[in-house]
Amino acid sequence: MVVANEWNPELEEQEEEEGGPKILGISLKDPRFIGGVIGIVGLGIAGFLGYNQLKPAIEKSAELRGEIKAADVKIKEQKKQIKERPKAEEEREKAQKQREDVTSLFASDKTMKTLLYDINKLMDQINAGITDEDQQAKMTKFQPLEPKGGNYIVNDNSLGPLVNGKLKRREFKVEFEGSYPQTRKFMIDLEKMQTLLVVKNLRTRLQQTNQAIEVEWRQNRFVAVSKPESRLRTSFDLHALLALSEQESLGKESSTKEEN
């Protein structure tokens, strides 16, 4: 028999066994504990589902930030280019002017068409005031030479390896007859021509003449009154150097890139 309010160890052990295990004094079978666990699990699931829903938006936001940053960099570069454009155009114009100054030293297709005419003008200047045709200077030969394959671009190292592929060359066989002063003046004037000309294989020889020598009888002997001036026959190869046109230069660069 047990009296009320009397402690009974067996009864307490039985109650503990019926309540199950406890954490911090709270039974795992306690509805409050179970409700809390369910709430925590539900919160975790909700967070996981929310993250999965927000993940594409987060990734898209990061992608947009990257695009915005790239756009900012591009805008800065464009602003820099706009700012530097006048300077670049000025440098381009300066380079173009320098190129024109350099190319003006060379012959051109236009000057090649008038080269013979220009040389004949030199002959007229040399013969100015000379009425005797036998005493006039003469150009006896002016023959254009066509290169093998019709390619005028210099590639044979004849002007140095640095010139290869950068200039064109037109060749002519020229022969000239005249006195020494006439020959000297012709060569000097030829050198002064605006067109850049190169003389190669220059050969000069004394020409035989059948001109009569005028004499007078003085002091029991013949004295020459006038002695005909010796005439020279000069021959040489005339090379006219031409700068490549922009189209030819671009074509040369393209072929070089293809070979590499």
Image: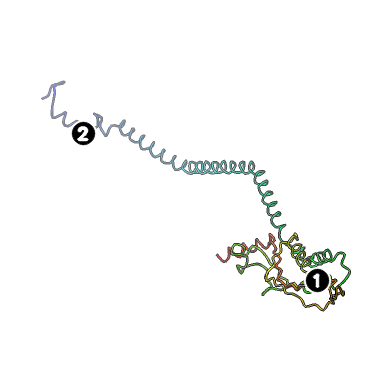
In-image side of 47 versus 3 (left or right) = right
- Identity of the residue furthest to the left in this view: 1
- Image disc number at residue 18: 2
First in sequence: mark 2 or mark 1? 2
Identify the residue at horizontal 67%, vertical 43% (top origin).
86
In-image side of 36 versus 71 (left or right) = left
Identify the residue at horizontal 80%, vertical 77% (top origin).
209
Residue type, numbered disc 2: Glu
- Image disc number at residue 229: 1
Tag 1: Cα neighbours inside 10 Å, few (<14), some, or many (≥20)? few
- Identity of the residue furthest to the front in this view: 219
Vertical arrangement, residue 223 with respect to residue 121, above or below: below
Check disc 2 and report its element: helix, strand or loop: helix
Residue 20 image offset from top left, x and y in percent:
22, 34
| Quadrant the N terminus occupies | top left
Residue 82 image offset from top left, x and y in percent:
64, 42
Residue type, numbered disc 1: Glu
Tag 2: Cα neighbours inside 10 Å, few (<14), some, or many (≥20)? few
Identify the residue at horizontal 71%, vertical 54% (top origin).
101
